[in-house]
Amino acid sequence: MRILITGVHGFMGSNLVESLSKVHTIFGLDIVSPATSGVERTYSWDDLEQGNVPVPDAIIHLAGKAHDVQNKAVAEEYFMVNTTLATRIYDYFIAHPEVKKFIFFSSVKAVAHVVDGDVLTEDVEYRPVGPYGESKAAAEKYMLAHLINDRETIILRPCMTHGPRNKGNLNLLYRILSKGIPSPLGAFDNRRTFTSIENMKFIISRLLECKVESGVYNVADDDAISINALVEEMCLAMGREPRIWRIPRSLVKAVAKIGDFIHLPLNTDRLEKLTENYVASNAKIKRALGIDHLPVKAQDGIRHTVESFSKKP
């Protein structure tokens, strides 16, 4: 199968290329086009407009602007990348009937900044907060309004995804714990789902192999874990004894607010992402793929990610 991946050089793209290029022919679409192992060729968005990109069998749209934890991005940037580019590549999909499958990486934040109730499912109403979630929601709505019979439009809403080459909040937490600094988050008692890149690669491979109903699907590991369990798993992977301090939550939140204004490892956005209750159900995607469980347990996925951090030069 010939697959066109947008944002091919990012964290998700590089990991998918690593696995998919073993059985598929991969073309890239990105703002830069260096030679990349596993990618036949990377094209520009201008190439797409000019008809220079080989028409693929499937498109995986990864290109997007991630949530800016430093709050330096303006709303226009989010909508330009997360909405305009997404609708642009989806219009290309609509115009080329040879392309049978379109996979769009959205986010759980497109519908819910916080989870009302115990578990987030795909049938909740759109209630995004802020330009990141709003721009993803706008792209989703456009695609859902232009579904094509007999051609698959699969919108994925992943929870926080981690793995090799990830530069997000788990990487930050790793750097703190690897220095022997205790976790100050022991007073937080939460449950949240993550997504291991190994489970993500498994899901994408299965989606490419089988036919599923067009629509929206949450992506998450099978089990939710707490911030303290996360710290314990990370320390275990590093061969360190977990050190967790139960500092009052009010004090931790106060320090995080200071981190919003000066350069500290902890700010309110990072604190929220690590300590919030955010459990997403993955039952729908498992039913669509005909499986009972994902191949990698949440705890094992965390350990694999931490081990990849320690191997970096």
Image: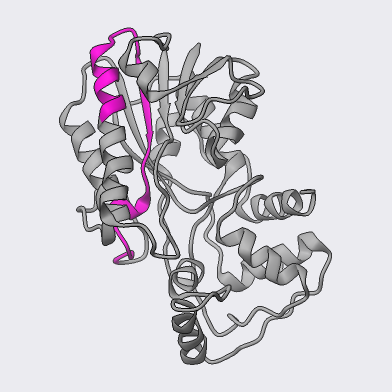
Instruction: State the residue lying farthest toward the left.
Output: 145
Relative horizontal placement of residue 240, taking residue 19 as reference (left or right):
right
Total count of labels: 0
Q: Does residue 7 appear in the picture of this structure?
A: yes
Instruction: Residue 95 in the image: state x and y as whole percent.
Output: 24, 13
Single out the residue that lies furthest toward the right.
239
On screen, residue 143 above or below 26? below
Q: Residue 303's image quarter?
A: bottom right
Q: In this view, does 26 lie to the left or right of 84?
A: right
Whether residue 111 is visible here, answered yes or no, is no
Q: Measured from the top left, where is residue 170 in percent x and y? A: 60, 60
Examine the image and state in which quarter residue 17 appears: top right
The residue at the point 40 percent across, 22 percent down is 59
- Residue 104 x, y percent position in the rendering: 37, 33
Direction from residue 244 to residue 63 in the image, left or right: left
Residue drawn where x is 36% and y is 65% of the image: 118
In this picture the colour scheme is: one colour
* Residue drawn at point x = 15 percent, y = 32 percent: 145
| Residue 255 lies in the magenta-colored region | no
Q: In this view, does 108 lie to the left or right of 91?
A: right
**92 is within the stretch colored magenta:** yes
Residue displayed at 44% across by 65% down: 70
**Near-viewer residue (23 or 299):** 23
Residue 225's place in the image compared with 301, above or below, is: below
Residue 237 position by quadrant: bottom right
Percent coordinates x, y for residue 147 in the rendering: 21, 25
- Image position of 2 with respect to 116: above or below: above
Which residues, given as a range, are shown in magenta?
A: 88-116
